[in-house]
Image (cartoon, grey):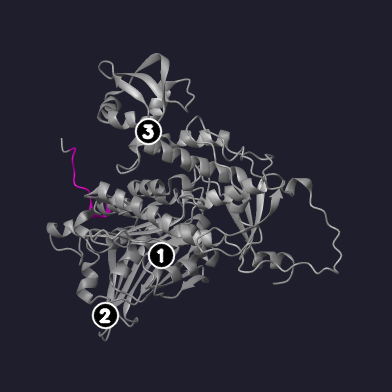
Amino acid sequence: MNRIRLLPDTVASQVAAGEVVERPASVVKELIENSIDAGPRKIEVMIRRGGISLVRVIDDGCGMDRDDALLSLERHATSKIRSAKDLQAIGTLGFRGEALPSIASVSRFRLTTRESGAIAGTEIIINGGKIDIVRESGEAPGTQVEVRSLFYNLPARRKFLRSENTESRNIEHQIHLQAIGHPQIAFTLLRDDRLVFQLPATATLRDRIRDLYGVELLERLIELHDTGSPKIKISGFIGQAGLSRQTRAQQLIFVNGRAIESGLITNAVREGYHTALMKGQYPVTFLFVDLDPAAVDVNVHPAKREVRFRDPNGVHEAIIRCVQETLERSRTEWQQKFRAPATPPSPIPEKATVDLKLRPEITFPEVSDRELPHLGRAVAGVVDSGRAVKPDEALSPQSSGGDGNEHRFQIIGVLGRLYILMENENGLVLVDQHAAHERILFEELRRKMEEQGVPTQKLLLPQTFDLPPRDADWIERNLPTLEKMGIGIESFGPNTFKIDSLPSFLNLLDPAQFMSKVIDDLRSVSNSSSAMRMGEEMIAKTVCRHAVKANDPLGYLEVEKLIRDLLDCDLPYCCPHGRPTMIQISLAELEKKFGRKI
């Protein structure tokens, strides 16, 4: 019947192009990757009408001779690999030999290239995949690719393109990715003959981030410290605890210099932050993972956006450990912001007339030996009541001495019975007393649970529930972990389980629904994480109910103990829900507000 037929070369090229060339930003990505592989010092990109009318990419790389230029336009012709064995250790951005012929098949295409020592270069013009002109050219050394009238011969594909502004933004994002991944290369973008940005080559990633995103963001980033693993090198920057975004737009991940999207790495970063992030928020990351090319497979996606690791658990654990250690190392630097000035403030001259009265809610009661009722309160019978702080143990509000290891600060007052006002060497500090106390109680309760075990409570009526086979198998394999978390569970038949006890601090109406959430949460938890990790969300809710609230009056000793305990926490930056505990208002900001500085 002859129902199966070979497609014409033109149609086959257009079908293949659909996998590689989705939109103008895809063209820019492929062309820049080819340019980077050629070893350039600078790359210039020009677009018109969002890249639909024109995309031009110019580099000063190694260039090509006439034969290589013609061969580069043949499908699956590449200089990057020679045999199937090379696919196991790809060290370049491009390797398939599909980009140029795919782009040329759906556009009016012009390629000019010249090697550094050559007298003349080569110019090739292609329309819809057919070569029209091949001739010598006098362009500068390097390669220049022009793509005009993209999808002119595929009107159906053109209908799916967005507005010119949207397509331009997508192109700009792609160039940002390549610029962050390769700071040693200068990048220039012109849009409709207007200069959008011109990034000089930089020696460090820090300089490139500053040029692209500004000094303010750079100051809120923490440099990643490599964990010293011989197989995996991790570098880059992550946002401080509390710095987050509502989307993953500023979560940039690079593997061996290639910008990728990886659920495994995204999950590892979030696990590393843990309670330092608000729910539903995403950290700001410029994360670089370098490992042996043989340990990662990049040939799993047509656009090379995804990769597959040969040891995914090793990569996952290394990133979690690196993020956690980096946040812990930054703790000391963070605490320095909240130390007192070296000298106490100058006293008011005796002759000066001051007729100001403090509002009652920001004055402190007389210091005494009494117990601290709020800060020492027991939480669900697990946290011990706090010890009274004696006056001679307290820091004087004007003190600045000490051995250098104490947390020194000057407490000014309490605003609105919620925000503690302090002075440090950088200016004014506002502390949310509720968020601060949440963090203190959270870490104390978690520590006691890990050391002493989780207090459990028997159910009056044990409950049974059924699970799908895969979930049931997972429960059976993780019974010891669940028992450590205070969950009394045992098999009660095929795919059926019985719960007879739960952690005493939980108040649950539906244990079966709770177990479904346990399964989902624990599957995303690192193997090396504490067995208490799943229950920390419940712990956070518990301490929220027991922490001091707004309008709870605190004495001076109570406030001072709160600040001391907060600065001794593992993650003092934010509460267990990710909200900041302290906000710094610098002297420079205050001087701008009062018009003392421009």
Query: Label 1 belongs to which residue?
Result: 180
The majority secondary structure of the magenta stretch comes to loop
The quarter holding residue 530 reads top left
Q: Is residue 116 above or below residue 248?
A: below
Query: Label 2 belongs to which residue?
Result: 115
Using residue 122 as the reference point, say whether residue 518 is left or right of it: right
Using residue 598 as the reference point, say whether residue 110 is left or right of it: left
Q: Which quarter of the image is occupied by the N terminus?
A: top left
Q: Is residue 249 above or below residue 529?
A: below
Mark 1 lies on a secondary structure that is helix
* In front: label 3 or label 2: 3
Pick whichever of labels 3 and 2 is earlier in the sequence.
2
Q: Is residue 198 above or below residue 460?
A: below
Query: Label 3 belongs to which residue?
Result: 453
Inter-mark Cα distance, 3 to 2: 70 Å
Circles 3 and 2: CB distance less than 8 Å?
no
Q: Decide whether residue 4 is among the magenta residues.
A: yes
Q: Amino acid at mark 1?
A: Ile
Q: Amino acid at mark 3?
A: Gly
- Is 528 in front, or is 28? 528
Q: Which quarter of the image is occupied by the C terminus?
A: bottom right
Tell me the crowding category of disc 3: few under 14, some 14 to 19, or many 20 or more residues within 10 angstroms, Cα based: some
Q: Residue at x 26, y 15 (%)?
A: 493
Residue 547 x, y percent position in the rendering:
58, 38
Q: Residue at x 72, y 48 (%)?
A: 364
Residue 517 x, y percent position in the rendering:
40, 30
Tell me the crowding category of disc 1: few under 14, some 14 to 19, or many 20 or more residues within 10 angstroms, Cα based: many
Inter-mark Cα distance, 1 to 3: 46 Å
Magenta residues (range):
3-11
Q: Decide whether residue 154 is among the magenta residues.
A: no
Q: Residue at x 59, y 46 (%)?
A: 389
